Amino acid sequence: MKTYLKFLISNFLRSFVYIFFIMLSLVIILNVLSEVEFFKEHKVSSFFPFYVSLLNSTDLIFEMYPFIFLLTTQIFFINLFNNNQIQIFKYSGLKNSKILHIISGTTFILGILVITIFYSLSSNLKNIYLEIKNDYSMNNRYLAVITNNGLWIKDFIDENTRIINASKIDQNYLENVFISEFDKNFNLKRNISSKKVDIKDNNWILYNPKIYIKNNSESLDKLIIKSNFNYLRIQNLFSNLSSLSLIELFELRDNYKQINYSTSEIDLQLQKLVSFPFYFTLMTILAAIIMFNTKQFRSYSLKMTIGLFICVIIYYINNFFYVLGDTGKIPLAAAVWAPLFLLLLINTKFILSINEK
């Protein structure tokens, strides 16, 4: 490896580690405060909120990677400017564009590592975090999961526990539903089967249900039962995809398809993960363009403020497109890649003159 290549990559990685741990520390500190508030009524050790915060911090930091790469690039160039190394490289025949190619390539490789290794670690820790929070939550009696056997719901009504299984979800309806109802001692009270159940609100309407109590059965035209779940709540329960690894996301996607449940949220999450290395690389290029085009400003804090301001705007534009894609207003591919294409066009316009800076 050429000396200048080794020097630039090692300095960029050093800046990345420096910014990463600063951001991670801030996330942990802020998260600890909320966890202390959550656990204040529970008998836990004083260290426990900090432990839980650590579990959640990798997921929180994952959303901050665009900021991390932007700040990394700015710190990297600030160090080069301070030591006049940019001028030394320029006199040695190393163009600014070559430096940008090197750090962009490094960013892309780091981006791939982020969505594979780091994301797997983050999702596993997030899963442990959610299990702990659920154990201490008032809502741990309620549960809904989707498996290859359909939708499963655990509900608690009037000291009775219901285990509900449905083969499909069709808009506001569950299909091929089987309900087992238990008393507070978990003794079976009755089983109910229905081909179609309206779950639009918390008063479920069972059409043509059959009720089984011990050895007796009864058929009805319609039965209304109360539930803590409705269609919107069931839909929202499966929105925390950050606790699932890439393999688990693909498995859940297949399970969703089997019960006719929308896969748009999973498809959006997968497309976002695929796009992240490109997103991070474009943010690195943007940060470099900002640093080269603000040489007239002596204040480095001003340069970093400009970069962060632009990054925040891009972040919210991205999220706006994600919402449009998730709600079906635009195709998912457009929701993920259109903002990045616009960022690419902006970068291309300014990158052509970067050697003149």
Image (spheres, grey):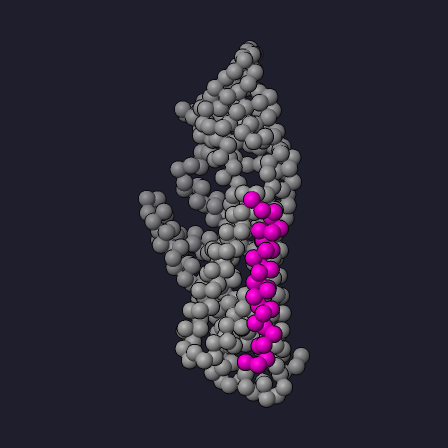
Residue occupying image coordinates x 61% and y 38%: 256
- Residue 45 visible somewhere in the drawing: no
- Quarter-of-image position of residue 140: top left
Residue furthest left as drawn? 41
Q: Which residues are magenta?
A: 329-357
Tell which of 234 and 304 is nearer to you.
304
- Residue 36 visible somewhere in the drawing: yes
Q: For the C terminus, which image quadrant?
A: bottom right
> How would you classify the magenta stretch by its main secondary structure?
helix
Q: For the N terminus, which image quadrant?
A: bottom right
Coordinates of residue 18 in the picture (x, y in percent): 48, 70
299 in relation to 93, above or below = above
Coordinates of residue 35 in the picture (x, y in percent): 38, 51
Coordinates of residue 278 in the picture (x, y in percent): 60, 62
Residue occupying image coordinates x 62% and y 34%: 260
325 in relation to 211, above or below = below
Residue furthest bottom as drawn? 91
Q: Say whether residue 255 is magenta.
A: no
267 in relation to 30, above or below = above
Number of numbered discs visible in the structure rendering: 0
Residue furthest right as drawn? 1
142 in relation to 339, above or below = above
Coordinates of residue 310 in the picture (x, y in percent): 47, 64
Q: Say whether residue 331 is magenta.
A: yes
Residue occupying image coordinates x 57% and y 27%: 174
Tell which of 177 and 135 is nearer to you.
177
Residue occupying image coordinates x 58% and y 85%: 89
